[in-house]
Amino acid sequence: MNAPTAPLTAGYGIRCARPTESGAIAALLARAFADDPVMGWMFPEPSDRERRTSRFFMLLQRQQRPRAGGVRVAATAEGRLLAAALWSGPGRWKPSAVRELATLPLYARAFGTDGLRRAADVENSLQAAHPETPHWYLPTLGTDPAFQGVGAGSALVRQQTALCDRLGRPAYLESSKPSNVPFYERLGFRVTRELRLPDGGPALWAMWRDPGRGRPRTPR
């Protein structure tokens, strides 16, 4: 389903990303995740972390692009990008084995040998904990640090959760920073479990949102 374009509010609007914006979106997300514990664990070398993180977000967008509304942005009328979100619809959160195999060399280039092993640990941990109940999935949300606090990130989430409420669909995400948990709680999500990455890796918090923020139910 195509994501509707939201009207301009406080100088920006919500819309589907354009293919020509993929590089700018990757750079924005790399800045947004500069202090993210999981990114720091996967890319331990500070000198090239931003470059590798940007390349990683280019690959994530490539996975999302076949899905209508898979990549969305908060942007000004002049095209300045404030924030970006990746969304996957029910039953579409996991890439096919063929697509994963085809992109493996690209991920190897982005992560390097050691980073690829850690990236695989992250992916395996997240997939093992992923709920079976059909839902909308938010794997990535990031706001340009220059625009933190203007509400662009929450607007990207609310656009989809409003649709989830109308369709009676839940939503799911993993927060990789404990400081972001209250942000998602204000948007109707609740922590369902803590996910600890192997080999002393950082924790993530699985979060679930029932449609209409009704009585919480534990996903299967």
Image (cartoon, rainbow, N blue to C red):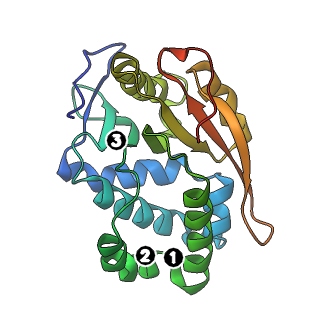
Q: Considering the image in quadrants, where does the N terminus appear?
A: top left
Sequence-first disc among 3 and 1: 3
Indicate whether 87 appears above or below 50: above
Q: Are marks 3 and 1 in contact (CB under 8 Å)?
A: no
Q: Is residue 65 left or right of residue 206?
A: left
Toward the right, the furthest residue is 200
Which residue lies at the image location 59% right of the left edge and 37% below the top edge?
A: 219
Which of label 3 and label 1 is nearer to you?
3
Q: Is residue 120 left or right of residue 64?
A: right
Q: Amino acid at mark 1?
A: Phe
* Quarter of the rendering containing residue 105: bottom left
Indicate whether 213 appears above or below 34: above
Q: Position of residue 52 (x, y in %)?
A: 48, 69
Which residue lies at the image location 54% right of the left edge and 16% below the top edge?
A: 213
Q: Are marks 1 and 2 in contact (CB under 8 Å)?
A: yes
For numbered disc 1, what is the local secondary structure?
helix
Q: Position of residue 94 (x, y in %)?
A: 40, 58
Sequence-first disc among 2 and 3: 3
Q: Amino acid at mark 3?
A: Gly
